[in-house]
Amino acid sequence: MERRNFLVNILLWMLTFFFGFTIKKEGDILNLSKTDARMVLDRDGKNISDKIGNLNEQLADTTAKVTYMTALITPSTSIADRQNILNSGYHVTFASGDYSIDQVMNITKSDTKVTFIPGVTFTVNTAIDYIFRLNANLKNIEIYGSNTTINLNNKANGLLTSAKNTIKQDNYIIKGFKVMNNDVPYKFTAVLYLKNVKNFVIESFSVDNYSRMVTQSTSAYCIGLFDCEDGYMSKISLGKSYIGILTHNVYNINLSKFSISNMLDNGVYLLENINDASAGVSLTNGLIEQCEEGIVNYLTDLTIDDVTIKRNTNKGVSLRKGLNVTISKCTFRDNNTDIGDDNSYNIYDNKIINNNFYNSKINSINLSRVSRSKIKDNLFKSDVITGTMVRIVDESSQGNENEVSYNRFDSTNQSITLLGITGYYSGVSDNLIAYNRFINAGVGIKLLRSGGTGLNATKLSKNMYSNVGRKKLIGAGITLVDEDFA
């Protein structure tokens, strides 16, 4: 019996080794099965090749996710070592604690990522330019704060600058900072100064008390964007500073969920693009209050949507230049003039639609060189207004061709005019004033000619008047089509 078992075992071993069979004993029965020659089993009878394949996939996935090596900076890390770590281009992490900042930290390589653990505070104790300065022409820069406090302490221009860029660089992300305390009057500086950057994100970023001690030769802004494009800014809070946001030569910039308040000068200052190129800038879902002027615009293609603009001492929106500007679903309250210009440039092809204007002190709208524009579906209501509620003056040779329709004008001041249009040059024509409701004023509509051929072919249609002393005051020499309700 023993000899027979020995011979059987020899035979089974030969089948297994030379021919690739596996033997599995179930009770007194031996089952033979052919195996894949490439398959190796572990002690549990599982395919080791499959396990290795799964492990390779996990390692490949992990490798794909790890794009940075990490290095830690602590409050005790020396100034030199901080810079050496940043020079590495690693993923640099600032540990929790209070840091004394006594020297500029230069970011010298593309693909640098800087992260701040919650509980970090920077205090600048030595006069420096910026806390972080980017070398020229770096791309893929990510800086993540965690509601990190930056105390400029009257000793630094700002948090970060990319002023050395000479060509546009891709992919900047800056999030999660509270910057405060610099009352020194710097000239043309910003807390965050971006130049020649495209595809960038600024988010959860606040500034308080920045450069309010200004003189005529100084100017500073919380965020400055120069020659930038394709940018998204959200959750921005700027207060008690000189200018909130200033841009020059930008394209496709979106600002949303923002609050800008208590600026000595402008809340948002949009300087012109080279050759008046289309800007594609949008401001949405925000608040601008207690500035000298809320928004100053020189751009083509601007959208202001769902923004509350209030208590500004001069204008809520100043259209110093304006082509294809749309202002919609906004609330204006307690400004001297809600929307105006400075009579420097012709502005045309604009839309002021579906807004609410409350308690304008001088004018709700006062535009001096406007044509081919719409003022439609708005509510104008003020009991404190002293000038014409909506005043349109044409001092260009473009012709008016404006539409004022479906608005409600309401004031208890019986000495004012609700809507006034004045023409100066020949060709001023084809205004449509239709389906408006004029309530409680001395004069509903006033049309005047100060020169040229007057307001030719202007049409009044289906307007309604209630408690208005004089419905219409029409100047001499004006050709008018009047289809108003009796």
Image (cartoon, rainbow, N blue to C red):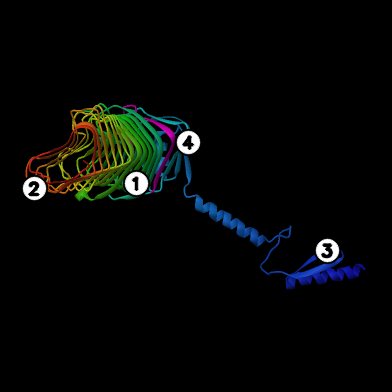
Q: Does residue 316 appear anywhere in the picture?
A: no
Name the amino acid type tagged 3.
Answer: Glu
Dominant secondary structure, magenta: strand
Name the amino acid type tagged 1.
Answer: Gly
Q: Secondary structure at mark 3?
A: strand
Of tags 1 and 2, the one toward the viewer is 2
What residue is disc 1 on?
231
Any mark on residue 84, and which? none
Of tags 4 and 2, the one toward the viewer is 2
What residue is disc 4 on?
117
Task: Answer with mark 2 or mark 3, whichever residue precedes in sequence.
Answer: 3
What residue is disc 2 on?
426
Of tags 1 and 3, the one toward the viewer is 1
Q: In whole angstroms, how far apart are the C-alphas of marks 3 and 4? A: 60 Å
What residue is disc 3 on?
26
Task: Answer with mark 3 or mark 4, whichever residue precedes in sequence.
Answer: 3
> Magenta segment range?
140-160
Few, some or many C-alpha atoms within 10 Å of disc 4 (few <14, some 14-19, many ≥20)? some
Contact? badges 1 and 3 (CB < 8 Å): no
